[in-house]
Image: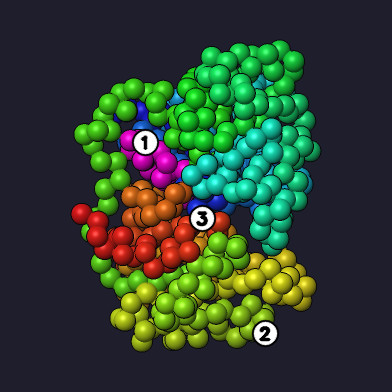
Amino acid sequence: MNRPLIGCIADDFTGATDLANNLVRAGMRCVQTIGVPGDGAAVQADAIVVALKSRTVPAAEAVEQSLAALRWLQAQGVQQIYFKYCSTFDSTPEGNIGPVTEALLDALHGPGQGFTIACPAFPVNQRTVFKGHLFVGDVLLSDSGMRHHPLTPMTDPSLVRVLQAQMRRKVSLVAQDVVAAGPQAIRERFASLQAEGVGVAVVDAVSNHDLMLIGQALAGMPLVTAGSGIAIGLPQNWPHVQARSADVRADALPPAHGLQAVVSGSCSVATNAQVLHFKQSGQPSLAIDPLAIAAGEDVAAQALAWAEPLLAGGPVLLYATAEPSAVRAVQEQLGVAQAGEMVERTLSRIAAGLVQRGVRQLLVAGGETSGAVVQALGVQRMAIGPQIDPGVPWTAVDTPLCPGEPVHVALKSGNFGSTDFFTKAFTQLSSLP
């Protein structure tokens, strides 16, 4: 196999698998690493996704992690760098999307130089960009559930305005009418913006067809920044991958076995509905109380003692998912950062304990929770398998908690998945060839 073609830097773990899922579905053989590997061993894949936990850390730390990932990917010989963030563009007013984009451009082109795009559109998951404004379904981002996000509330739908506040480089727009005119028109718009001193162009996209047109226009661009949607349009720039994909399954995984569990830390609207559906289906579920954690109770041990006798009967759910008002009440008592860290730490201990008790099929909901769980399991790489719902694939991982036995893991972004996701995911896995 030739050297990897695309090297990706994802700012959280669910986003990384989301991106890898789209690349695999487009026929690319993809390897996902957890953090920047400590060695320079060559990776045999068409695409590499480096999963970082950098979305909500201080901007300087996010930049440092991202530049380390860039250097490692460059050593792998990749042809194009892809910085992946959430399709809801969620960040703080200070970053980290803008600072990381700026640092990557500086590293690739020199200080203040270079040009790239910003496009979080993922139409199949109802994320579209029109006139530079991000929509979630039929409403603006600022009118969606993201306005209540506990860490990165999004109250401004203008991507140009949000990104410009985070960057020194000038930010502008490639509007829908230009995208609809095709790849040549898009490239001409890129050139005219560069001549005006623009460093980043927000690109409209309202359909997968738009993403395919944009993808063609991005051939040869050293750095792409986007959600995972743009990934469906990039593989066409390497025709030999497209030709091979008809003959080679890029999403094959080993057979699944073992016990099943769900660990959920996301408090998004979608995940709240999924938790409710699971509970209403009659499956066993246990709520994790942040105040009990803060009071010094060993909540992880209590949760594992509850789960152990139930696991043989089918999947169990352990969740800290709650409605926005309940989340705010906890944050007011414990502080935003402290509450989040305590819950993540407890859920990751629970996940590790479940694997030690025979769980080999594990579904994790929430980006921050997924990062904590994968790190607790000691996972270094993930094989990307078939899609459950848009943006969420099953993966297979090795963990020192059960050497020699693959664990099937699905990392679900809080905003993704159908209402019955928690139940249908296991049904789908059991039916894989």
Magenta-colored span: 19-37
Q: Which residue is mark 3?
A: 416
Q: Earlier in the sequence, mark 3 or mark 2?
A: 2
The reply to whether residue 328 is in sight is yes
Q: Position of residue 228 (x, y in %)?
A: 51, 41
Query: What mark, if any, has residue 105 been given in the picture?
Result: none
Is 359 placed left or right of 135 in the picture? left
Q: Is residue 236 above or below residue 410?
A: above
Is 94 placed left or right of 415 in the picture? right
Q: Residues within 10 Å of mark 3 (few under 14, many from 20)?
A: many
Residue 27 highlighted magenta (yes or no) = yes
Secondary structure under tag 3 reads: loop
Q: Position of residue 30 (x, y in %)?
A: 37, 40
Which mark is in front, 1 or 2? 1
Please name whichever residue, 101 or 165, is drawn nearer the observer in this view of the structure. 165
**Which quadrant holds the N terminus?**
top left
Q: Which residue is mark 2?
A: 295
**Circles 3 and 2: CB atoms closer than 8 Å:** no
Q: Which residue is mark 1?
A: 26
